[in-house]
Image (cartoon, rainbow, N blue to C red):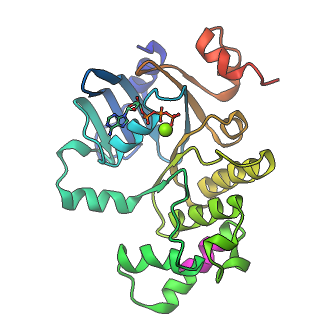
Amino acid sequence: MMEKAKEKSEQNHKPKGTDEHVIVIKGLKKSFGEKHVLKDINLEVKRSENVVILGRSGTGKSVTIQCIVGLLKPDSGSLKVFGDEVADMSEKELKQLRIKIGFLFQSGALYDSMTIRENLEFPLTRILKIKEQAEIDKRVEAALDSVGLLDSIDKLPSDLSGGMRKRAGLARTIVVNPEIILYDEPTTGLDPITSREISELILSIQKKYNTTSIIITHDMECARLASDRVVVMDDGEYIAEGTFDSLHKSKNKIVAAFFKDIL
Ligand SMILES: Nc1ncnc2c1ncn2[C@@H]1O[C@H](COP(=O)(O)OP(=O)(O)OP(=O)(O)O)[C@@H](O)[C@H]1O
Ligand SMILES: [Mg+2]
């Protein structure tokens, strides 16, 4: 248990409705058969905060964010988004919630047969049900401009490089103006320079749209650039949290292992 985090959360506690904390997770548990993946997850994410989750492969980072969007149901504990318990939500409420949460999948998940413009129009017409073409054009162009891809609006995903596809995926995530963005390994598979560009974009999106984000990454440069706060996950729990610089000095062996190559 993280005593410091607990103390901090109690100090910051505000009654429901003030919206100070956008995501509040307490004592979250999730097992798959005999495999106890999440043992005791506690996390509070404030509005406009970027929280990075570090953790070894298979520790349950992706499972955590799948619980946040209600794709997986936790076994016990509490997980509230905007003050409401996700596990108690009806399908209709979950649908409403997912409109407010952007999810950047590892692959970018663009439709290959659609142009970049069509890929971005899709959530606007299908999810937000926007009908006015002028409004759609305005939003699509603004989102592509934010990621520096306006020039590629009429291209197919296959015409773009990996880094550009990642940016297009990011544009499709922000085109619906989500309040929360969950990034699952946004820089994996990219070269260091492109990774840095994506990390800087994550930061600029936070500033521009005031989004609250959880960023799962193994990329320490991304963690350094994009995080307001970092939590380290190990064996189903969060074992440390703090700013990137404060964790950098940690004596904890598991935490230190993540920072070993950082000067
Ligand atoms: N739907 C599922 N059914 C059964 N087991 C699952 C399911 N989803 C995840 N797991 C198991 O839960 C564990 C944690 O998976 P998870 O994908 O959250 O890891 P991760 O921390 O995101 O790892 P990585 O860094 O490799 O992405 C793994 O052992 C995985 O096999
Ligand atoms: Mg994962």
Front position in the image: 19 or 225: 225
Q: Is residue 145 above or below residue 166?
A: below
* The C terminus, quarter of image: top right
- Rendered residue at 62%/57% (across/down): 205
Q: Is residue 138 above or below residue 53?
A: below
Front position in the image: 164 or 49: 164
Place of residue 115 in the rendered image (x, y in percent of width and height, measured from the top left):
58, 80
The reply to whether residue 85 is in sight is no
Front position in the image: 105 or 138: 105
* 40 to the left or right of 117: left
- Rendered residue at 65%/13% (across/down): 250
How many numbered marks have been drawn onto this rendered protein structure? 0
- Rendered residue at 24%/26% (across/down): 33
- Rendered residue at 49%/86% (across/down): 135
* 22 to the left or right of 232: left
Place of residue 116 in the rendered image (x, y in percent of width and height, measured from the top left):
59, 76
> Predominant secondary structure in magenta?
helix
Q: Is residue 143 magenta?
A: yes
Q: Is residue 219 above or below residue 107?
A: above
* 244 to the left or right of 1: right
* The N terminus, quarter of image: top left
The reply to whether residue 139 is in sight is yes
Dividing the picture into quadrants, the one containing residue 130 is bottom left
Dividing the picture into quadrants, the one containing residue 44 is top left
Place of residue 140 in the rendered image (x, y in percent of width and height, measured from the top left):
56, 78
Chain part drawn in magenta: 139-144
Q: Is residue 259 magenta?
A: no
